Amino acid sequence: MTDGTDVDEVSMRLRFYGAGDYATYWQIQEAADIIHRFNPSAPPEDVNGILELHNARLFVEAGFTPKDLPEAEQATLTGAVGPIRRVVAQWFHALEDEDLDDMLSDVDWQYHEHLLELLAGLGVFGRCSATPMLAALDRARIHPGDLLTSKRLVENYDTQVRDLVLADPDRAELVIRHHLEDQVRKETFLPASLTPADQRALIQTYIDSDNPNGNYLRLVANAPIDAKTGVDKRLIVNAKRRYDAQVKEFFATNTGIRTGCSVSVSDTQIEPMTVSLDDTVIEYTFSEAWLEDTLDNASVLNNFQFLFEFAPEDGLLTMPAVDSERRGLESVFGLDGTHDYLTGHVFTAKDLATLSQTVMYQRFLEARDIDLEEVLRWYFEEHLPSELGITGFAFTPSSSTANYLERCRNLFAEMESIATQYNLFIEDGEIDHDVATAGADLVRYRAIPSALEGKYAYATDHPEIQSILHILFSDQSHLTYVDENLSGDNAVDLLVRNEVPYEALHAFQQPMIDKLIEIGLAENTGQRIVLTNFPLFSVLRSLSHHEAVAYHHLDQAARAHVDTMIDAGWLVRRSSLLTEAEAAYFNYNLNSVDFSNGPKLRNKYQHGVQPKGEGEAQHQDTYYRALRLMIALTIKINDELVLASAGNGIPTADETSVDRDS
């Protein structure tokens, strides 16, 4: 920055952020003022003046001009677009190798992106040499990562950019993000001369460096093997070992924050379950009297579904990670890989709770000589024939003398067997065990068919349904905060917990409420905005909380709303045993079909490649995870078979429970 330049003045320069950013709306008048002051005969000479003028033109071209502007002044703004475009182009066309440093090095940080776009779009990279250009951009403090967002820069300066990337081990982060990070803000490009061998060597040097970032180590550790990226199994192992060492070192010197969940059984509690929060620990307490009174096989399975809340609403599992549960900051901090199962704090809490409850209940039942695997056998081999007339299913529990390693292997095999048997039952109407065992392959949980037509409704990419779901349920919605006295975690929370008058809303918030009123979800009573139409709300809530709607569980009013949204292109119906989110959850836990960051439990135990040093404690933990998945799969099968046997009616929660009298 040149001497005498006021930092505050530069930081407040005009910038067009795009139509989706509210900062754009606040600068409309400033953009108009800059254009009114524009004199084609005396244009700015410095790079920041030129780029500010360019940004002012972007406002007008996008239709962002002051409201109620007289027609003559509107014409003046529009008429200036062409001359501004010519002035900017002339300034860039005049750049030569020898003056690049003087002309570009003082560019303001907020104009880095626009500078690169104009240098590329106006052909400057094609006629100026690599050495002075890259030196000038370095003097301008433009990060190498930003350079890689310019395809033309990378193509024109291929070998020089390769040398730039390889010059510093920390620049392995750029390569890792390019190949492995999910949902990047802007696409990046790597030079063609940067070979997979170059990339592998750079990443290995980064892993061995003094202080590699754990986020990038984790991306490599969870990455799929790919010759094009240079990632092989040894690189993955090296990254994982370094990451694990960093975590161990951190917790050796930092006590951290007490968090997690506790599960206990009370001999005095009347309620079946209570939940409380002690500091940051969620405490689940269950009534011993309730558990003692529900020891029959059917009630044991019902306790998992309803008491432990595996699937208390419409047979939809609560365990999967869904995007609506990831808080805004969780999407900003940390790095997600392109093949990662996207989790967050809510998923972690749910995962720990359902696992802890499974452990507690298995031990509670074991102390009363009840084997959970025997309960599962009873369901498939006795309950289905007697209650639903469905025969042929077979489930073989683990031996009572088996260790946890043997139990894991057996339970994973039986889970796949049940999935295969169910597939055959839906496709053929019967279970031929010779067919089931012939050419047995990895179960595709997404492809397990359904007995019900159009079983689930899913939101499409239609902007209206996506906007409504974001407005209602996202913590990043612009309808979460009105003032210090009117706020909520999301729009639903804001409107339910507060009396929000329409007039209290900001001008940019009122169109959102207007949309909710238009679709019949909200009403302006004159005193406040209230949410109405529970059937519609229940559909939208399920789309947010489960990423699916169980159509055959809906009443007629809710089905009518789903049908209307399908006609509008907002929703689509598809059939499978599991929802897309549920199938992803199974694949995350069991294999590497969809995700590279999961525990791959089935793969390890079915192929016998679990680390030799894990020991019985690790096998015990895996067994409980396998048991949880098997119970969840059983709940899904039972829910569907009951729905099918009811002729696609609308059963109550009691009707989809396992019958205690059988």
Image (cartoon, grey):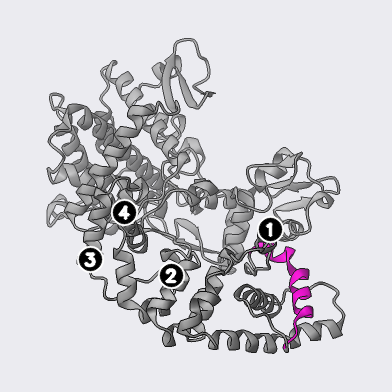
Whichever of callouts 3 and 1 sits on the residue coming sooner in the sequence is 1
Q: Secondary structure at mark 3?
A: helix
Which callout, 3 or 4, points to the residue nearer the camera?
Answer: 3
Report x, y in % for residue 268. Answer: 49, 10
Q: In this rendered view, identify the residue nearer to me: 47 or 272.
A: 47
Looking at the rendering, in which quadrant would you find the C terminus? top left
Whichever of callouts 1 and 4 sits on the residue coming sooner in the sequence is 1
Name the residue rendered at 18%, 29% in the picture.
404
Report if the CB atoms under discs 2 and 4 are less than 8 Å apart.
no
Q: In this rendered view, identify the residue nearer to me: 196 or 653.
A: 196
- The three-letter code of the residue at mark 3 reads Asp
Q: In this rendered view, identify the residue nearer to me: 410 or 617.
A: 617
Q: What segment is highlighted magenta in the picture?
A: 21-40
The CA span between labels 2 and 3 is 19 Å
Left or right: 8, with 339 as reference point: right
Residue identifier under label 1: 8
Whichever of callouts 3 and 4 sits on the residue coming sooner in the sequence is 3
For residue 321, above or below residue 468: above
Q: Secondary structure at mark 2?
A: helix
Residue identifier under label 2: 147
Assess disc 4: are there few (<14), some (14-19) or many (≥20) residues with their C-alpha within 10 Å of its C-alpha: many
The answer to whether residue 450 of the structure is visible from this angle is yes
- The three-letter code of the residue at mark 2 reads Leu
Name the residue rendered at 13%, 43% in the picture.
609
- The three-letter code of the residue at mark 4 reads Phe
Report x, y in % for residue 475. Answer: 60, 47
- The three-letter code of the residue at mark 1 reads Asp
Assess disc 1: are there few (<14), some (14-19) or many (≥20) residues with their C-alpha within 10 Å of its C-alpha: few
Left or right: 627, with 501 as reference point: left
